[in-house]
């Protein structure tokens, strides 16, 4: 049985090597791979293929075009450059791409392998270059902006990330490491951390890292998140606890001169608070922690495995609902025992007095 591994981390949006392409999705079509990562040298002629599948029950006509893209936002999104007044500059790739076909017809259920070539100039700038091959249901000449190679219909794209060998600067730093909303006081887990990494170089990076949580005594907290194993039907079949919070677990790319945000959550049990004291009490029980906690972040990036470290904010977890409930329980027990003892003493005295009268 095929197994699919999924890491469950609170509030994390993991796209792996994928970027979210800012276009309307082309229905009833599957293209693969969604992302191509290529290492090349100046003057290389790189031959690659894209696989297309018509998932519908009808014959479809698709138009092919090419373009460039850039990073958008901090969540791993990619924005297609479709403004004639805007260019990708030194990071452009589209001019190097040669498509074998400008349009294809796929019968219902048909699969097709489409070759294309990347002609790397001998004067190519070392570092990263980024382009996209689009499949659209509308021809390029109908674009309102008048740009060649762009359609106004629905479209899907294969993102292409090319790294040209050479003396390309690799650089980056941890721009921010904190908790969501800079929160420091919690009544229970999860504690959600934010890591923002800035790529200052000229080539895309895949930094990876881990957060270690320590208690007030400086000892590492164990079991801070877990990995679940699912079968091919999405049914969980196994889970495994982790002693660290992984950062960029699925190897997401960060384009040059851009920032990417990673989220990691320390928790014991998944679930949401529906509101109210009892629901909060249940959350504190299942996601219990108590005390002062610190954290340390270590990240590794680049071809030389450069290491960055950072110290996170101090957080305090005080389960006040459990505390109030325990104090209320102790108070009830105290007064109940006091009442029982008092009644018992009264009974003893009453019995002693009765025995004295009889004598």
Image (spheres, rainbow, N blue to C red):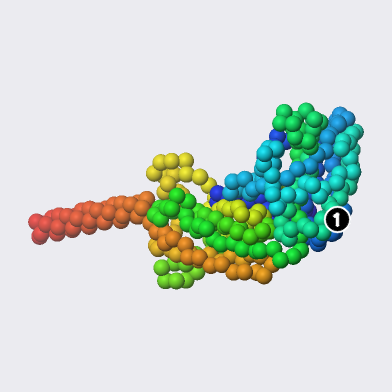
- Nearest the viewer among 98 and 25 is 98
Query: Which image quarter is the C terminus in?
Result: bottom left
Judge the density around disc 1: few (<14), some (14-19), many (≥20) Cα neighbours within 10 Å: some
Position in image of residue 114 (x %, y %): 88, 45
Residue visible at 54% across and 61% down in the picture: 174
Q: In the picture provided, is 185 more to the left or to the right than 339?
A: right
Residue visible at 56% across and 67% down in the picture: 308
Q: Is residue 47 placed above or below 27 in the rendered structure?
A: below
Position in image of residue 65 (x %, y %): 80, 39
- Nearest the viewer among 294 and 272 is 294
Residue 152 is at least partly visible in this image: no
Q: Quadrant of residue 107?
A: top right
Position in image of residue 211 (x %, y %): 54, 63
Residue visible at 44% across and 60% down in the picture: 313
Numbered marks: total: 1
Q: Which residue is mark 1?
A: 46
Q: In the picture provided, is 30 more to the left or to the right than 203?
A: right
**SS under mark 1:** strand
Residue visible at 57% across and 57% down in the picture: 197
Position in image of residue 282 (x %, y %): 45, 49
Q: Is residue 213 placed above or below 30 in the rendered structure?
A: below
Q: In the picture provided, is 84 more to the left or to the right than 274?
A: right
- Nearest the viewer among 331 and 321 is 321
- Nearest the viewer among 336 and 353 is 336
Residue 272 is at least partly visible in this image: yes
């Amino acid at each position: 049985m095929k197994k699919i591994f999924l890491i469950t981390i609170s509030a994390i949006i993991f796209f792996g090597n994928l970027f979210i392409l800012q276009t309307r999705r082309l229905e009833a079509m599957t293209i693969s791979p969604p992302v191509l990562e290529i290492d090349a040298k100046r003057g290389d002629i790189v031959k690659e293929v894209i696989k297309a599948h018509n998932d519908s029950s009808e014959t479809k006509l698709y138009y092919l075009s090419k373009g460039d893209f850039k990073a958008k936002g901090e969540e791993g999104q990619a924005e297609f450059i479709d403004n004639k007044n805007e260019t990708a500059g030194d990071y452009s790739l589209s001019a190097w791409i040669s498509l074998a076909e400008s349009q294809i017809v796929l019968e219902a259920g048909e699969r097709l392998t489409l070759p294309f070539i990347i002609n790397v100039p001998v004067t190519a700038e070392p570092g990263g270059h980024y382009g996209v091959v689009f499949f659209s249901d509308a021809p390029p000449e109908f674009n309102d902006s008048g740009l060649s190679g762009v359609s106004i219909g629905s479209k899907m794209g294969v993102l292409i990330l090319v790294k040209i060998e050479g003396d390309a600067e690799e650089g980056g730093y941890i721009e921010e490491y904190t908790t969501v909303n800079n929160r420091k006081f919690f009544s229970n887990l999860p504690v959600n951390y934010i890591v923002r990494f800035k790529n200052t170089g000229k080539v895309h990076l895949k930094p990876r890292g881990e957060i270690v949580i320590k208690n007030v005594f400086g000892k590492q907290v164990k079991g801070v998140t877990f990995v679940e194993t699912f079968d091919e039907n999405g049914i969980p079949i196994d889970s495994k606890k982790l002693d660290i919070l992984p950062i960029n677990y699925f190897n997401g790319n960060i384009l040059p001169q851009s920032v990417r945000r990673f989220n990691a959550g320390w928790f014991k049990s998944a679930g949401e608070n529906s509101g109210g004291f009892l629901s909060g009490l249940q959350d504190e029980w299942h996601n219990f922690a108590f005390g002062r906690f610190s954290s340390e972040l270590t990240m590794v990036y680049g071809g030389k495995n450069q290491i960055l470290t950072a110290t996170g904010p101090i957080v305090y977890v005080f389960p006040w609902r459990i505390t109030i409930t325990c104090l209320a329980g102790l108070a009830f027990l105290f007064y109940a025992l006091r009442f029982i003892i008092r009644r018992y003493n009264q009974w003893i005295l009453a019995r002693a007095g009765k025995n004295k009268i009889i004598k």
